[in-house]
Image: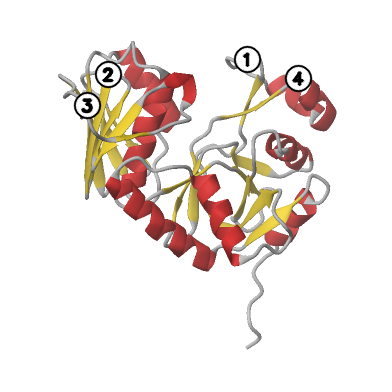
Amino acid sequence: MSAWASLDAWVVTGELAPAVAGALRGRWGHPASGKVRRSIVLRRGTVPPSPLQGQDTPGLPNDLRVRAQGDEVWIGPALHLRVWDGGTEITVASDGRDVPEAAWTLALAEAHRAGGWLALHAAVLTPAPGQEERGVALSGPSGAGKSTAALRWAHAGGRLAAEDQSWVWPETGRAVGLDRWLRSSEEGVRRFAPEWLARAEGLDAYGKLRLPLTSPGAEVPLAALLVFGLPPQPSAPERVRALWEATGVPLSALGRRRGAAGVAALLERLPIRGVTRENVLEATRQALQPLSLPES
């Protein structure tokens, strides 16, 4: 039996092909601090028929059809999720080798959303070693400049805890990065962080260099969410919209309830500001300034 921790969940993958279980652990196997509170069990079995009536989820990768009804989710023909307080059961119609990566990503992401975590499609930048452990999440639409900003930050001596996949516990604002690599074109690396070329570990499926992050799996309290394309001081509706756009769409009823509660909790504690390519590094430095203590 294969079992490992992902955030605050114990994941059991014993009925999957070893290569599939290993790949899932490599992608999702970063535990959070604190107690394990729930379980995610992947079992091989018969996927129940999807309902004739239910909510289809449009705009997913590779034309992957997702249907949800209550706290059950069907992802493609091979995966079925059932979520509840304290756990998730994922039924797989095979040993998992024929399930596309996008389907696994949706399944594990929904399991964590139902557990109360907020996904942030954001790079997480942290200070150089020896400084206070805090992080800044950097989000925005595809192509806005997150990877370039991350390379520039690394070149300046900062560290990277996530490129695009981080998870936040809303009540504390602590984020855990679930990426292992920063992906960038060779031209971008040569321009913004040439010393990182020697770190490359091959290419991803899109021909970009895979650069190992300096702090993969690090858990840090977030000092701010900086968003490309927002005004410097966004309005309350703009902050709400930016956070929802960064966290993605929950699939199950429980995931939607937990997501709404998480967004509300995080909005109360996390500053959200707009940045540009020109000022993003300075805004990051300002957000990571040590907290000032009141005079005694």
Horizontally, residue 122 falls left or right of residue 128, namely: left
Spot occupied by residue 290 in the image (x, y as percentages of width and height): 67, 65
User: Which residue position is annotated with label 3?
Assistant: 50
Determine the CA span between mark 3 and mark 1.
37 Å
Q: Nearer the viewer, mark 3 or mark 2?
A: 3
Determine the CA span between mark 4 and mark 3.
44 Å
Tell me, yes or no, if residue 288 can be seen here.
Answer: no
| N-term mark: 4 or 3 | 3
Spot occupied by residue 5 in the image (x, y as percentages of width and height): 33, 37
| Circle 4 residues within 10 Å: few <14, some 14–19, many ≥20 | some
Q: Residue at x 56, y 62 (%)?
A: 270
Q: The residue under label 1 is which amino acid type?
A: Leu
- Provide the secondary structure element on which disc 1 rests: loop
Q: Residue at x 79, y 31 (%)?
A: 193
- Provide the secondary structure element on which disc 4 rests: helix
| N-term mark: 3 or 1 | 3
Task: Say which mark, if any, is on residue 203.
Answer: 1
Q: Nearer the viewer, mark 3 or mark 1?
A: 3
Task: Say which mark, if any, is on residue 186.
Answer: 4
Q: Nearer the viewer, mark 4 or mark 3?
A: 3
Q: Are marks 4 and 1 in contact (CB under 8 Å)?
A: no
* Residue furthest bottom as drawn: 296
Tell me, yes or no, if residue 257 can be seen here.
Answer: yes
User: Which residue position is annotated with label 2?
Assistant: 78
Spot occupied by residue 183 in the image (x, y as percentages of width and height): 64, 26
- Say if 219 sits above or below 73 in the image: below
In front of the other: 218 or 164 = 164
